[in-house]
């Protein structure tokens, strides 16, 4: 077999391994192929080099971190690979290559330098992919652009995700049964990702039933295909919804199962850390803070070893929330406050405002517990300001909680008229979400089992 044909064969084998969920084999195959492609000069080999870099990054994403890399399999110096992709695209000079490089740069920026730069990179990738006439690449770019734009504007993000869905339907209509062939090895993963981010966006908008349907669809597809990273992500998003709906037992069972599954494959992955922390959050909401402690502490230790900025502040906030619990034996308001101030500072740099707003809400609670009502109001007011500036909805954040914390802070300093207005807004959000749940029993669970909802609706 000619050398060029052998390289394409090796790439096909690695791609098939990834599509079948054998990520370590895919990393090994792509990694072995790449050195030979670095010395090639013909256009086909240059294009294959870029596709191999992308495959290597896709297959190793479970182990991505922003804290450096040993370079050992399956861990890679992914920042160097992203830089290399940019150099290869500049050499190739075509729109598709530049789109791939921009897409990879955006994914790297999400976990490192911040959300704003990442969204800009995804937008660039989408523009270039459209100019190149590559619908598959355009679908990838719009899915990521839409998902991460939700953190800045839920309306703009939802519009981009609707466009991604339209592109997916167009591809399926044009190619029909061919979407099961080798040219579409990533198709199942693409659709699972799109359903997943559409589902979590619907949840963020307060549409619980629609969000749950899409998230279960994504989870089922990822599980059936053995896609470890996408299964872990869809489990996380689904369980965020279940926790917010007061279905703590379901969330705990699903997270425990996923932690066991991923633990045998990538025990130190940031995905694993996020799911462990979310399991702790479920137990906090279920009034079992001492049971939450080991999970959140394990997650925090994992992220200190393998940091990921997109996840780090979320888990830091969970740890602070744990330390605030009156029934937690390790309660420590001082450490909680330090963690929350660190989160707020970091979020201002990275652009993850959802976690900054959550940190401000919890800081308000800390200051109120310490008898500093003025600071409590200052923090809660800033949280409301940031939320409303973003359109009133943010991912991984309960809008009603922001308003309820503001109500509590205002009540604490005797601003009863303003407090009543904040409470009305919290109740409005809760009841609107309840209306999105068709099942009467699940609607009652949402209203009565979630501590925040129960408290807000019981206030006089």
Image (cartoon, rainbow, N blue to C red):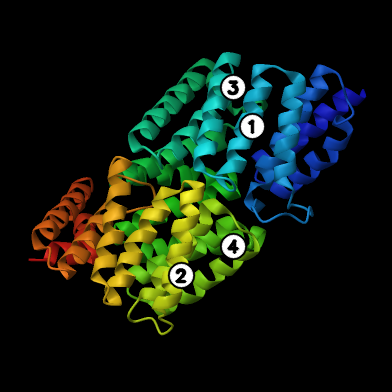
Q: CA distance from mark 3 to mark 4?
A: 41 Å
Q: Secondary structure at mark 3?
A: helix
Residue linked to disc 1:
185
Q: What distance separates the C-alpha of mark 4 from that of mark 2?
A: 18 Å
The residue labelled by disc 3 is 178
The residue carrying mark 4 is 303
Nearer mark to the viewer, of 4 and 1: 4
Query: SS of the residue at dot 4?
Result: helix
Dot 3 alpha-carbon crowd within 10 angstroms: few under 14, some 14 to 19, many 20 or more: few
Residue 379 in picture, x, y percent from top left: 31, 60
Task: Nearest to the eye among marks 4 and 2: give it.
Answer: 2
**Left-right relation of 266 to 364:** right
The reply to whether the C-beta atoms of the residues labelled 1 and 3 are less than 8 Å apart is no
The image quarter in which residue 110 lies: top right
- Disc marking residue 244: none
Q: CA distance from mark 4 to mark 1?
A: 32 Å
Q: Secondary structure at mark 1?
A: loop
Q: Nearer the viewer's eye, disc 3 or disc 2?
A: 2
Q: CA distance from mark 1 to mark 3?
A: 10 Å
Q: Nearer the viewer, mark 3 or mark 4?
A: 4
The vertical placement of 86 against 416, above or below, is above
The residue lying at 77 percent from left, 56 percent from top is 70
Q: Position of residue 354 (x, y in %)?
A: 39, 50
Quadrant of the image for the C terminus? Answer: bottom left
């Amino acid at each position: 077999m000619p050398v060029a044909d052998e390289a394409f064969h090796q790439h096909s084998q690695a791609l098939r391994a990834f599509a079948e969920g054998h990520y370590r084999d895919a990393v090994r195959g792509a990694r072995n192929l790449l050195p030979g492609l670095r010395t090639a000069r013909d256009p086909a080999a240059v294009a294959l080099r870029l596709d191999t870099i992308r495959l290597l990054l896709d297959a190793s994403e479970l182990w991505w971190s922003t804290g450096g890399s040993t370079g050992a399999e399956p861990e890679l110096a992914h920042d160097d690979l992203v830089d290399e992709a940019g150099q290869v695209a500049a050499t190739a000079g075509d729109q598709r290559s530049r789109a791939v490089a921009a897409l990879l740069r955006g994914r790297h920026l999400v976990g490192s330098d911040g959300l704003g730069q990442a969204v800009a990179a995804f937008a660039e990738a989408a523009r270039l992919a459209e100019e190149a006439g590559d619908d598959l690449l355009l679908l990838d770019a719009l899915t990521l652009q839409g998902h991460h734009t939700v953190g800045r504007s839920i309306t703009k993000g939802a519009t981009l995700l609707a466009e991604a869905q339209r592109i997916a339907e167009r591809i399926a209509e044009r190619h029909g049964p061919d979407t099961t062939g080798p040219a579409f090895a990533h198709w199942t993963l693409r659709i699972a990702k799109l359903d997943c981010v559409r589902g979590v966006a619907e949840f963020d908008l307060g549409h619980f039933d629609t969000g749950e349907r899409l998230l279960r669809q994504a989870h089922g597809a990822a599980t059936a295909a053995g896609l470890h990273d996408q299964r872990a992500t869809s489990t996380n998003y689904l369980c965020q919804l279940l926790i917010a709906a007061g279905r703590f037992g379901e969330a705990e069972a699903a997270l425990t199962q996923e932690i066991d599954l991923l633990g045998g494959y990538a025990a130190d992955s940031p995905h694993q850390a996020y799911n462990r922390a979310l399991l702790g959050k479920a137990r906090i909401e279920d009034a079992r803070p001492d049971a939450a402690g080991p999970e959140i502490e394990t997650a925090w230790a994992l992220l200190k070893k393998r940091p990921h900025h997109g996840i780090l502040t979320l888990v830091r906030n969970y740890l602070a929330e744990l330390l605030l619990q009156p029934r937690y034996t390790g309660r420590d308001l001082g450490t909680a406050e330090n963690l929350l101030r660190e989160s707020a500072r970091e979020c201002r740099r990275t652009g993850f405002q959802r976690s900054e707003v959550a940190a401000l809400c919890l800081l308000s609670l800390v200051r109120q517990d310490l008898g500093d009502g003025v600071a409590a109001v200052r923090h809660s007011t800033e949280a409301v300001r940031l939320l409303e500036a973003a359109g009133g909805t943010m991912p991984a954040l309960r809008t009603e909680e922001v308003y309820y914390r503001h109500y509590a802070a205002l009540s604490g300093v005797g601003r009863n008229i303003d407090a009543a207005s904040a409470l009305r807004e919290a109740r409005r959000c809760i009841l609107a979400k309840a209306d999105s749940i068709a099942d009467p029993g699940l609607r009652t669970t949402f209203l009565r089992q979630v501590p925040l909802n129960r408290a807000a609706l019981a206030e006089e």
